[in-house]
Structures are given as structure tokens and as C-alpha cells.
Amino acid sequence: MALRDFRLPDVGEGLTEAEILQWYVAVGDVVTINQMICEIETAKAAVELPSPYAGTVTALNVNQGETVDVGTVIITIEDGVASSGASAAPAAPAEDDRNLEVPTGKPKQAAVLVGYGVKEGQTPARRARKAASGTQEELGESIVVELHDGPVVAKPPVRKLAKDLGVDIRRIRKSGNITRSDVLDAAMALHGMEQPPATTYDPHREDRIPVKGVLKEMAQAMISSAFTAPHVSVWLQVDVAKTLKAVKKLKDWEEFEGLRVSPLLIVAAAVLQATKEFPKINSSWDEANHEVIIRRYINLGFAAATPRGLLVPVIHEADGMDIPTLAKELMSLVDTAREGRTPPNRMQHGTLTITNVGVLGIDGGTPILTPGQGAILAVGQIREIPWTVKGKMKVRPICQLTLSFDHRMIDGELGSRFLARIGALLEDPSELYESDNDGDDE
């Protein structure tokens, strides 16, 4: 009989660890290929893992609630194939699941679900020793940094991040490769974002929440964004009476049957239209190549408070959607996020973000940029307040919009014109859904 080790795969882009939330199988159970064997939580989402092997479970190598690194053996399965000699030929997994198997033997890139994981046969210590003995040219993109505990390897982007955050990379005591996560953890401690261990703890009056998974990713992302991008915010109050009329009108259209139509849908459509007119808003700063990237597509993210923490699910290629399609995608995105089941691929590659603080009864705020993006729009609650209309005081539904942007590539004029255009579209959204103007809404 041959024993098959299943290693924790990378289910996102470059994720390094995950927590085992729940095992669906136990030692002695018989499993089949593609059978779901456990649920894990990464810094992005909770996902289920299918078995790449068929056979009998002989060991669960990780306990529920335990967080382990990508590449760790989490389960061992006896495949029932007789082995001959010192080793047995590996059983061929199903074609759709070969990317789940982490091969052994000659060192090469370990296969993962999405993205790339660690290389087998080459530990961080070995990489560090190799780097320490090589020349700058031989090391390629990695640079050796001498620490108190010996040499380690840190890549230039990691060193640049440490410099931007004011972290002395030489003081990070770690053998082997210093990662982005190590630098962000150090920055959190440096800037007082991580409290020292309490000397006493009263379990009857205090609660402690482990900083891991989504919470850890959110904290690191906010630290990275706040201390690397120069934020500037502008805000605008908008009369949204016609937006509310548009919501009522669209609800009666056949194309919106079964869909939720809300002011947020109109805001999203307005953001997409304004971004097409001001494409530099949809940009990011590429420090490594000293370039500004202006994208000709819009992946619109929506900051969402979920049971697992703050997530930013994304509607990809949103600029190519009509209003009904956008409504369908937005409804699906919100429902999935509330259930805590947003897949990793729906939280990647966002280019622009909307955060709706109005649903929480808040008038407005100054949002922090999603890392790698140039702008984020905060939408406040709609309140009826006195408003001057053609020289007369009336009570109108008013909403405050706040735009935060990266001042390295978006100047005040561009940010202000972009926000003003969104405001104009919300004051008269008829062109967004190709309908006749509603006329005078005083």
C-alpha cells in the first residue's frame, strides 16, 4: 500500500498560510477523488479543499483551528495500491485535480490551486546560505542582509516596503527569507498597531481575538496603504432626488425583475461612467518600474463588512456591463459576501473601490485606499435636509460623497473633477440608463 501526503495548496495569489476550520473526514474514512475533505480559511476567504487521492485516511496531520504554512502536509491517505521495492509509482490523480498534487523528487515549483507556492527541496536556510556565498549578479533579484542571527535573504520590493514604512530591516530577527508579511508585522508594532502582551487577563471581563486570517490581512493592507500612498480626500454633497426616482422607475422595468435596485447601483453606474471620462483615476503606482499604470478596464470593488471581517469583493470588467447586468452582479456579490463565501478570485485585481458607509447611518468619512489602487469613493447616508433650489429653500434628500485618492498620480484638479462628474450624474442619472429626462423634480 502507498501512502499519499496532501500538502496545503496556495488557494489564492501568493497566500502563505491558512487555518483549518473544519475536517469533513476522520482517520479510517474512505475518500474518493474530488471529495471535499476540509474547509480552510485564508487571508482572503473560506474555501473547501477536494481530495486529490482516493483511499483510506490514515492521518490528519493538522488540528482544527490550527494555522499552518502552504506546503505543510495536512492529511495522509493510503491509496490501496501495492508498492514494490523502496518506493511505489504515484497513483495518477484525476485530470482536473493534478494541480492539487505536490510532487516529490527533483526540486521544482510545487503546483498550487492558484498562483505559485514554495519550491520543494530548497528550504529558506539553504536559500540564505546560497545567497550569502554568491555575488550580487548571482543572487539576481535577492539581496543578503546581515542580521545578528546570521545572513537572510530579502528581495528589493520587501526592502523598499521596509524603507517606506520606516522599518529597519536589519532588526527583523528571522533566519531565512524576510517576507512582506514580516515587514508589515514589524510596521504594525512600530506604529503602535499591535499591543504588547498583557500581564494579566480576566476572562470574565475581557475577550481576545487572534490576529489571523482576514483580520490580519486587513490590518496589514491598511498599514501598507496608509504609510505608502499619500492620501488626499475631497467631498461633495449631492441632491439625489432624481436618483431616488430612478430607483423606483427601474424597479418597474422587466429587465430588473427579481433583482435588487438601490441607490448604490446608480452610484456604481455613475462611477463607471465618470471613470471612462477620467481614465487616469483608474490607475496605480508601480514603484518597482517607476511607472504609473492606467488601466483600460474597470474592476469595481465594493468594501463589505462580513462575518469574517472587512473584504473587498470585485466585479471584474464592470465597465462593459449595462445596468441590469451590473445589478445582477452586485446582488450576487453582496449576497455571497454576507454569507462569508466569496471565492478568492472575486477579491483579486480590483482597480477602483466603493465603500457604502451610509448603510451604517454615517454621513461620510475619509476612506483609506485599497492597496494597489488609485482612488476609493465613500458614499454616506441619504438625509432630508434644507437645501436651496432656484433661490427657494426646500427639504431635499442629500448624500455626501468623499473621494480619497493617491496624490502621486492623481492631482487635486483631476480628483475634484471626477467627483463633481459623479455628483452631476447622481443629480440627473437619466443618461446612465438611456431614459428620457424626468423633468423638473423640485
Image: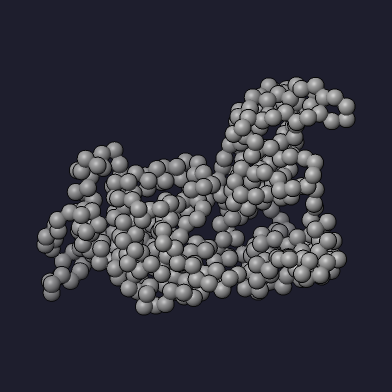
Q: With 33 as the anchor, is 265 left or right in this view?
A: left
The image shows residue 4, relative to residue 321, as above or below, that is above
- Residue 38 makes an appearance in the image: no
Task: Identify the residue at image location x=25%, y=39%.
Answer: 257
Q: With 135 as the anchor, is 390 left or right in this view?
A: left
Task: Identify the residue at image location x=39%, y=63%.
Answer: 377
Residue 50, percent across and down? 61, 33
Residue 149, image quadrant? bottom right
Q: With 264 as the anchor, is 225 left or right in this view?
A: right
Colour option used: one colour
Quarter of the figure that contains the C terminus: bottom left
Task: Identify the residue at image location x=46%, y=74%.
Answer: 409
The image shows residue 324, relative to residue 146, as above or below, that is above
Q: With 173 as the anchor, is 96 left or right in this view?
A: left
Residue 415, percent across and down? 38, 73
- Residue pushed farthest right? 85
Residue 275, percent across and down? 36, 64
The image shows residue 99, relative to residue 131, as above or below, that is above
Count of marks overlaid on the render: 0
- Residue 406 makes an appearance in the image: yes
